[in-house]
Image (cartoon, rainbow, N blue to C red):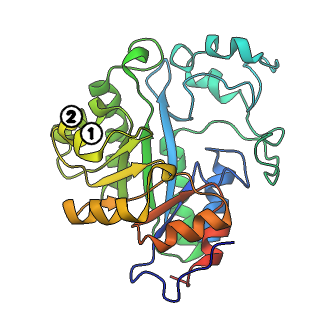
Amino acid sequence: MLPLPDLLPPVRPEVHGHRGCRGLFPENTLPAFLHALALGVDVLELDVIISADQQVVVSHEPWLSARLGRGPTGELIAASQERSYNLYQLPYAAIQRCVVGEWPHPDFLQQQASPAPRPLLREVLRAIEAACRRLGRSPVGYSIEVKSTPEGDGIFHPTPSPFTELVLAEIHSAGVQQRTTLLSFDLRVLQAARPLAPAQRLCLLSETEEPAASLFQQLGFVPDVFGPDYHLLSLAMVKTLAAAYPRLRLVPWTVNSLDDLRQVISWGVAGITTDYPDRLLGLLPAS
């Protein structure tokens, strides 16, 4: 087990609950978000896709995942057929019938079964804002990932500009834009978002070893936040990024084991995204 340094970094990292708290409750569901909120996360991370009737739906895949739940008529979904259950071709009324969390995810043995539909983004924002008031806690932040790829344009989702417009409209309608970061692996989404909402905080996600400087050059600007896979980082790289981009916030993902959490805390990053916010919170001083 890696020891914590004698002194924690001067800035306590934000706790970002990945898909709510995927290690504890079914991902991207209201039960997961509400549990993460009650635990005390600083930021809720979630993913969005678009339905056939242009609704912004909280889901990681733009199809019905065989591992998460059933189809519209209650049928089990074969893994080989899941992409044929294309959410971009289904109205939200049909998506809402496809409950997830009936059984625990096989990769997360602590996950509690808690059947729930894939919610609309506006429902999540409304419920969480109300829960913050009810719990008497400070408002939470939101990290909303736009799930987009060039190959999926017009098949699994709209092209970046209309996709981003739909998401930004929900963020602005809920009045949470100042507490929200828009995330994407797709450079085009951030490029579309910048002129549409110049004040909106943007995060470039990365899962490649391509240097940040190269990615930012392709993007055309330095984002507010950089979110790499934590396996791609080291203390030396964190220091290099801080020296090159003093205002850049670094929020690596998805850090789950206690040893890895301890190590990433010691790097002094701005935030840590985890499936187990309870573990991370247990390693940090109270906020």
Q: Position of residue 132 (x, y in %)?
A: 53, 68
Residue at x 60%, y 63% (from the top left corner)? 260
- Left or right for 83, reference 162: right
Q: Is residue 220 left or right of residue 149?
A: left
Q: Is residue 16 visible?
A: yes
Q: Residue 28 placed where, x, y %?
A: 61, 44
Q: On screen, 44 above or below 262?
A: above
Which structural element holds mark 2? Answer: helix
Give the residue number, with chain letter if any, for mark 2.
218
Left or right, 204 with reference to 245:
right
Residue at x 74%, y 20% (from the top left corner): 71
Label 2 is placed on what type of residue?
Answer: Gln
Name the foreground residue: 146 vs 227: 227
Rate crowding at label 1 as few (under 14), some (14 to 19) or many (20 or more) other CA atoms within 10 Å: some
Q: Are marks 1 and 2 in contact (CB under 8 Å)?
A: yes
Snapshot quadrant of residue 153: top left
* Percent x, y of residue 239: 32, 66
Instruction: Give whichever of 31, 152 is nearer the camera.
Output: 152
Q: Which residue is disc 1 drawn over?
A: 215
Q: Which residue is painted at 65% across and 67% down in the image?
A: 259
Cα gap from disc 1 to disc 2, whole angstroms: 5 Å
The circle on residue 12 is none
- Along the line of sight, which residue is nearer the eye, 129 or 3? 3
Residue 78 position, x and y percent, is: 78, 15
Q: Residue at x 42, y 38 (%)?
A: 208
| Quadrant of the rendering where the N terminus is positioned | bottom right
Q: Quadrant of residue 162?
A: top left
Q: Amino acid at mark 1?
A: Leu
